[in-house]
């Protein structure tokens, strides 16, 4: 197992993991893995080649071969490419999230993406954001955080995030979709969403993002990660 330090951030949709992971990576000068984006990209890659959405073998094959690229800057403007097409916006829709959650329940897809995810662990360190970072992909992570927030707050945050990106969404429909996605993520047979036994649980309902970042940096300091 690699000796590169990893901070694993797991939790349900809309808990604020993505923002937290990005700010931590910028603060520490570490690499970032947005593992949800890999599942979103895979679902999109499948639909691009006309794969049956339930065809596990086709998606597992694509998971190993799809040509993806992440670039971005500290301001948080992400750029994600599938082949030669920039898909940063397309993969953020709730429809893409739903597709991601479907392919993410396929065991051979998860196995195929494992190595790809581990390759992100490069010096000087990695902040990894997902559902199974601390439990499965990086079981030796030096710090594991399981981030939650109330269902109402998570739906509101996701609503604001999508509105800010210019998407036309309804809060009621979004709450329903998030609940269904969480249900599927928590109940699937492989790598279900659950805290690692050694994870630090943070319920960030009512906390500002700055407070959450500080709380995690304090934990990182006690483990001599910064
Ligand atoms: O985090 P994000 O909302 O982008 O993730 C989209 C979907 O990808 C999740 O609902 C989940 O089904 C799946 N996922 C996963 N394991 C991860 C990251 C995401 O199963 N490590």
Image: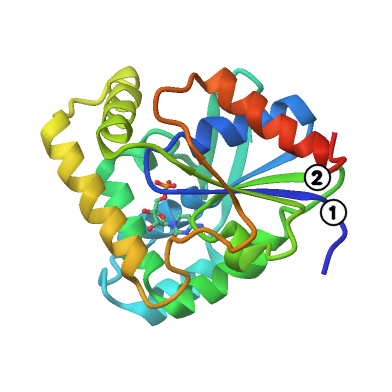
Q: Are marks 1 and 2 in contact (CB under 8 Å)?
A: yes
Mark 2 residue CB less than 8 A from any atom of ligand 1: no
Q: Residue at x 56, y 51 (%)?
A: 68
Q: Quadrant of the N terminus?
A: bottom right
Going from the N terminus, do you reach mark 1 or mark 2 first?
1
* Vertical position of residue 59 compared to residue 17: above or below: below
What is the secondary structure assignment of the residue under circle 1? loop
Residue 39 disc label: none
* Residue marked by disc 2: 125
The residue beneath circle 1 is: 4
Residue that appears at 54% across and 52% down: 35
Residue 41 in the image: x percent, y percent? 44, 52
Residue at 41% across, 72% down: 59
The percent coordinates of residue 48 (x first, y second) are 34, 57
Q: Is residue 2 left or right of residue 73?
A: right
Q: Quadrant of residue 89?
A: top left
Q: How many residues crowd around disc 1 within 10 Å: few (fewer than 14), some, or many (20 or more)?
A: some
Label 2, residues with CA under 10 Å away: few <14, some 14-19, many ≥20: many
Quadrant location, the C terminus:
top right
| Above/below status of 124 relative to 171 | below
- Name the quadrant containing residue 20: top right
Q: Quadrant of ligand 1?
A: bottom left
In this view of the protein, which residue sits in the foreground, 45 or 217?
217
Q: Is residue 31 left or right of residue 83?
A: right
For label 2, the SS is loop
At 21% from the left and 54% from the top, the residue drawn is 180
Q: In the shown orientation, is residue 203 left or right of residue 4?
A: left
């Amino acid at each position: 197992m690699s000796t590169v330090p990893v901070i694993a951030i797991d939790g349900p949709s809309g808990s604020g993991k993505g923002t937290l992971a990005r700010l931590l990576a910028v603060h520490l000068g570490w690499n970032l893995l947005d593992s949800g984006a890999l599942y979103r990209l895979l679902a999109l890659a499948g639909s691009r080649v006309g794969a049956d959405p339930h065809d596990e073998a086709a998606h597992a094959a694509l998971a190993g071969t799809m040509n993806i690229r992440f670039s971005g800057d500290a301001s948080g403007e992400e750029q994600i490419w599938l082949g030669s097409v920039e898909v940063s916006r397309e993969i953020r829709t709730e429809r893409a999230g739903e597709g991601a959650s479907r392919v993410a329940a396929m065991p051979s897809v998860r196995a195929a993406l494992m190595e790809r995810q581990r390759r992100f662990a490069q010096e000087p360190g990695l902040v990894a954001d997902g559902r199974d970072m601390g439990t499965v992909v990086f079981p030796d992570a030096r710090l594991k955080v399981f981030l939650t927030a109330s269902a109402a707050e998570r739906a509101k945050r996701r609503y604001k995030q999508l509105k800010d990106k210019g998407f036309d969404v309804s809060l009621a429909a979004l709450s329903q979709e998030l609940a269904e996605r969480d249900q599927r993520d928590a109940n699937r047979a492989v790598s279900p969403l659950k805290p690692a036994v050694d994870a630090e649980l943070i319920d960030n309902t009512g906390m500002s993002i700055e407070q959450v970042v500080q709380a995690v940096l304090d934990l990182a300091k006690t483990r001599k990660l910064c």
